[in-house]
Image (cartoon, grey):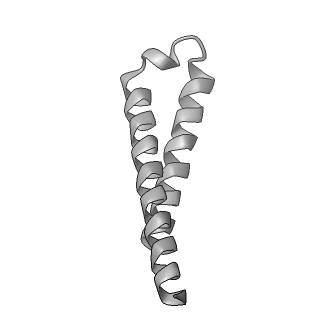
Amino acid sequence: MSTAAVLVARIRSRERVMSNIVERNPESYRENPYYTQLQGAVVAYRDALTQLERIASVEEQVVLA
């Protein structure tokens, strides 16, 4: 499994858990420390995925040049 695929799977998994937390606690989910941790992880994984996409784009441009 590629690094990008792992990142996408982790993002989806954490978003699913976050969604469950919101459904169970719609009034107080933002105060839940676990929800906050998951949200931070999703942001970090998305940043890593963006960096991988940039690297792949640069490598592709170098190959085509």
Judged from this view, the residue extending furthest toward the front is: 65
Give x and y (percent) for residue 64. Answer: 55, 88
Looking at this view, is 54 or 42 the one in front?
Answer: 54
Do we see residue 48 in this rendering?
yes
Residue at image position (58%, 33%) is 20
Do we see residue 1 in this rendering?
no
The quadrant holding residue 48 is: bottom left
Give x and y (percent) for residue 47. Answer: 43, 50
Looking at the rendered structure, the number of numbered marks drawn on it comes to 0
Judged from this view, the residue extending furthest toward the top is: 27
Residue at image position (46%, 43%) is 42
In this rendering, is residue 41 above or below 6? above
In this rendering, is residue 39 above or below 26? below
Looking at this view, is 18 or 50 the one in front?
Answer: 50
Give x and y (percent) for residue 28. Answer: 51, 12
Residue at image position (42%, 59%) is 51
Residue at image position (49%, 88%) is 63
In this rendering, is residue 9 above or below 59? above
Give x and y (percent) for residue 40. Answer: 40, 36
The quadrant holding residue 34 is: top left
Looking at this view, is 60 or 31 the one in front?
Answer: 60
In this rendering, is residue 28 above or below 40? above
